[in-house]
Image (cartoon, grey):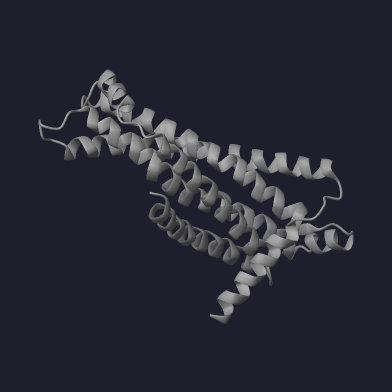
Amino acid sequence: MSSFLTHFGTYLLMLKGMFTKPENWRMYWKEFMHQCVEIGIGALPIVVIISLFLGAVTTIQTAYQLVSPLVPQTTIAQIVRDSMILELSPTVLSIVLAGVIGSKIASELGNMRISEQIDALEIMGINTKSYLVLPKITAALVVIPCLIVISAVLGIWGGRTAGEMAGILASDIFDMGLRQNLNIYNINFALYKAYTFSFIISSISAYFGYNVAGGALEIGRASTKAVVVSCILILVADYLLAALLL
């Protein structure tokens, strides 16, 4: 328990230390844009592949289960749409991104800590929390929700294509189902989850990377801890958001 409280207190102090006036706005903006490109473009291929196959598998499995002639085929499209928007795109993709983005952030900051680059910046009078950690968190808050929106769109399109290719349901019937009973709140809820999960992934990974102590071996351990803790907190936050907002 004391170890948890120590980690939690250090984590809060790191977040508090980020919010100071930047020494040079241009350098901060440049670092922010660099992180947006690194996080967004780096994770885009895996997002595209996972989303397309998630949508395709959801369509085929839903059609397999809804064999009753009493259930209209448009219901398959509605289930695929709501599954992708509510759960698969925000939660499953965030767990994948915790491995892709989280380990990258943790190892990058850990390497800077081990090689004493962070100490050198602090000696120069730069607030390393705001210069190194804040751009990563803000970039994740901008880019990861965009990736989740792309994922939802691609997942629905992948489900539509798979349904047509497998001969399960025609694309016009799928389109008809997509337009039926659309609840706009589901999209808002997915965005709430996206912002929450992106903050968890970036801040937890930055915390473990920033506070690495020891040698090169500790960087790998910090990356692993960052991914594991991020995944657990994503699942806990997923449950809490569903219980509170749905």
Quarter-of-image position of residue 54: top left
- In the figure, 234 relative to 35: above or below? below
> Is 242 left or right of 97, judged from the image as shown?
left
> Is 192 left or right of 58, judged from the image as shown?
right
- Residue 89 can be seen, yes or no: yes
In the displayed orientation, state which residue is furthest to the bottom: 2
- Across and down, in percent, residue 53 comes to 36, 37
> Is 171 left or right of 142, judged from the image as shown?
left
Quarter-of-image position of residue 169: top left
- Residue 211 can be seen, yes or no: no
Relative depth, front residue between 112 and 243? 243
- Across and down, in percent, residue 50 comes to 42, 40
Count of marks placed on residues: 0
- Across and down, in percent, residue 70 comes to 10, 32
In the displayed orientation, state which residue is furthest to the top: 172
Tell me which residue sits at (58%, 78%) in the image.
3
Tell me which residue sits at (70%, 63%) in the image.
14
Tell me which residue sits at (55%, 55%) in the image.
200
Tell me which residue sits at (47%, 39%) in the image.
188
In the displayed orientation, state which residue is furthest to the left: 69
Relative depth, front residue between 213 and 148? 148
- In the figure, 162 relative to 112: above or below? above
